[in-house]
Image (tube, grey):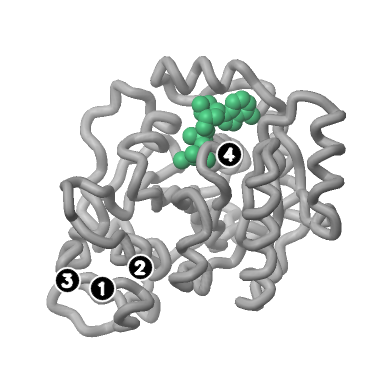
Amino acid sequence: MTRVGQSNKPLYGKRILVCGKGGSGKSTVVALMATILQRKAYEVMVLDGDASNPEGLIRLLFGLGVEGEPKPLIEFFGGIDVVTCPVDDPSPLTRINDSAPVPEHRIDLFREIAAEYYLQKGSTTLLQAGKIETYGQGCDGPLEKVVRDFMVEGDAVNVIDMKAGIEHFGRTIPDRMDVILGVLDYTLESVSIAKRIAEFCQEAGIQDFWLILNKIGSEEVESLLMDKLGNLQGKVIGSISYDQELIKVGLSGNALGGCKALEEVAHIVERLEQVVSFQ
Ligand SMILES: Nc1ncnc2c1ncn2[C@@H]1O[C@H](COP(=O)(O)OP(=O)(O)O)[C@@H](O)[C@H]1O
Ligand SMILES: [Mg+2]
């Protein structure tokens, strides 16, 4: 894996959590961002952190024909019976037969993790925390602990596709994130969730919290939504049009390719490169 010029890139090494209302377009935004980041010569690590969506992100990135899903990372850490919920039991995430907390020992992905745990396309690597597999499996907190604590060495930009809503804020998952991106569609529910996320980010001291307006069908809808956002308007780093192509591609099961939304996401990534804090 080449890392040419990674240090010139403002997003290198950042962990970006993409969150928001169900159906607002989180997975679509993650897949489009991965495409743009790869085009900009970033090494990209995409983590599917949505335990409830069996194959949404994998399809958008690789298409339906992909052979087999990556093995869930939760198994690397001993499985759902071993890993605990971040809040009920705040013990650190460790590897099997090792008591050292994972965040203090960033993992060298390609040397330490077997290839069955990831899928690759160009400079993009997809991993998944784990999925709800069986009836009565229990709380998905352990999967969220993997999302929070799975930290890899190197310069890749990490883009994490989170499950819908705000439960993960109640579980301190954003604690180890550098950037929180909230995706809104054109609903009031999205606006309420964005306001709540803004409060949580303030409480957690996260400065890099930005909003993306998605599925914007007209300037009128965009300005109505901006009105509803009130003092959060300054947090909006870009909008993505309502794009029928995305729906058709999603339904067909093909990987996302070139479309109007992709170029809009290119602008959003450029904005993000300008606004993220350097530290
Ligand atoms: N900009 C957009 N224009 C039109 N449809 C979109 C757009 N973004 C996402 N969608 C569609 O909305 C649906 C939900 O998107 P998805 O990314 O799966 O949302 P989430 O991950 O937030 O649940 C999909 O059918 C997707 O194709
Ligand atoms: Mg999704």
Label 2 belongs to which residue?
Answer: 145
Upstream in sequence: badge 4 or badge 2 = 4
Label 3 belongs to which residue?
Answer: 82
| Residue at figure coordinates x 56%, y 37% from the top left | 25
Upstream in sequence: badge 4 or badge 3 = 4
Q: CA distance from mark 3 to mark 1?
A: 6 Å
The answer as to whether callout 1 falls within 8 Å of ligand 2 is no
Residue type at the position of mark 1: Thr
Residue 46 located left or right of residue 39: left
Secondary structure under badge 2?
A: helix
Label 4 belongs to which residue?
Answer: 24
Badge 3 vs badge 1, beta-carbon distance below 8 Å? yes
Secondary structure under badge 4?
A: loop
Residue type at the position of mark 3: Val
The answer as to whether callout 4 falls within 8 Å of ligand 1 is yes
Label 1 belongs to which residue?
Answer: 84
Residue 269 point in image, percent of width and height:
68, 45
